Image: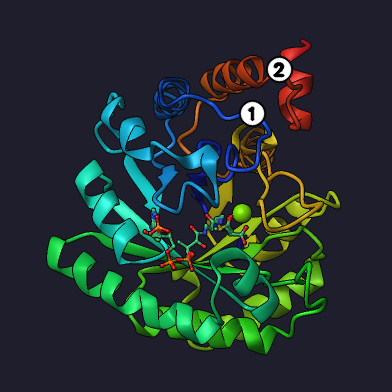
Amino acid sequence: RLPDRVTLVEMGARDGLQNQPEILSAEIRSELINHLARTGLQRIEAGSFVSPNAVPQMAESHKVFSLLHRQPGVTYGALTPNLKGFEAALTAGADEVAVFASASEGFSQKNINCSIAESLQRFYPVMEAAEKHGLKVRGYVSCVMGCPYDGDIHPAAVAEVAGQLWQMGCYEISLGDTIGVGTPLKAKKVLEHTSRTIPISSLAAHFHNTYGQALANVFALLEEGLAVIDSSVAGLGGCPYAPGASGNLATEDVVYMLHGMGIKTGVNMEELLKAATFICDQLGIPSRSNAGFALSSL
Ligand code: HMG
Ligand code: MG
């Protein structure tokens, strides 16, 4: 039942950098993305059009877009929390956008300063504008396996929010284990609930690796037929509003696992390692990818 091919959605330049203590210039961020686009990754999140007061690391995302050497076949996406963000993303030349909601009220308030219901209301004008301009909209649901403020989250609450994003026209819903607390059977439960209204082919796994569970959780969902996975080069990542959460599942680790199982990704590991080395050197930090570390030591 495992898929033959998996689509990876690269988070390094967005989720990966949004919580780094160091604020990188638009030049360095675009250079990272240009590296990533040479690896064979076809979907890359390039920035966020959010309040620069809230997330200064993502300021100047328009400049990042202007400096891209666009590769044919690569989609460069951006986060847009509201219409203001959408308009900025459109002007910058984003190929697609993403709205982001939470399965928990506590995280919704801290992250985007409004309730879940209010956030969904803010997304309608984004959906309308996106449709008018022919841009696809991805939807995220955060805290699908636990919330740093509200604790445990029931899969039905995840399915409810995911279903609403789907209904309003998001083409894909990415299920975010924002603080990386999930374990494989819980991940399967979340998928089971959400896939009652959304086809599995339109769901993605966005798992953080705080407790070392991300790869196991991904494998659990591959077994159910899920075939879109969010990951981040060098395992970078974290959310400013999710204290203690560590990086996303590392792209190198998931590529190593998938290729080892004969599942295609289209990603060239050598090029990926170059991108990881580039960004880790810029940040002055070691890679958080086990496979990346091992392969770089060979
Ligand atoms: P707010 O303060 O409620 O918004 O923030 P507001 O409408 O009252 O506006 C306040 C100020 O922000 C105004 O400026 C607006 O113009 C400005 P002022 O008049 O005071 O000078 N503003 C904006 N500026 C730039 N771009 C915008 C924008 N909108 C308003 N789009 C808001 C609400 C959502 C804007 C704010 O809370 C925010 O930007 N939050 C950022 C949240 C964020 O980026 N979090 C990280 C990404 S989510 C994530 O990481 C999870 C994910 O990875 C999945 C997972 O792991 O679970 C996706
Ligand atoms: Mg995330």
Q: Label 1: how many residues lie within 10 Å, few (<14), some (14-19) or many (20+)?
A: few
Task: State the residue at coordinates (74%, 32%).
Answer: 289
Front label number (2 vs 1): 1
Quadrant location of the N terminus? bottom right
Of the two numbered discs 2 and 1 on the same chain, state the one appearing first in sequence: 1
Q: Quadrant of ligand 2?
A: bottom right
Q: Is residue 290 above or below residue 169?
A: above
Q: Is residue 279 left or right of residue 137?
A: right
Q: Position of residue 251 (x, y in %)?
A: 61, 38
Return the residue nearer the eye: 46 or 174. 46
Q: Secondary structure at mark 2?
A: loop
Report the number of discs.
Answer: 2
Q: Is residue 41 above or below residue 112?
A: above
Task: State the residue at coordinates (28%, 46%).
Answer: 94
Q: Position of residue 234 (x, y in %)?
A: 66, 30
Identify residue for label 1. Answer: 22
Q: Are marks 2 and 1 in contact (CB under 8 Å)?
A: yes
Q: Is residue 9 left or right of residue 110?
A: left
Q: Is residue 84 left or right of residue 111?
A: left
Quadrant location of the C terminus? top right
Q: Is residue 94 left or right of residue 285?
A: left
Q: How is the image coloured?
A: rainbow
Cβ of mark 1 under 8 A from ligand 1: no
Q: Position of residue 19 (x, y in %)?
A: 64, 42
Task: State the residue at coordinates (31%, 27%).
Answer: 68
Identify residue for label 2. Answer: 284
Q: Residue furthest right?
A: 211
Amino acid, disc 1: Glu
Q: Secondary structure at mark 1?
A: loop
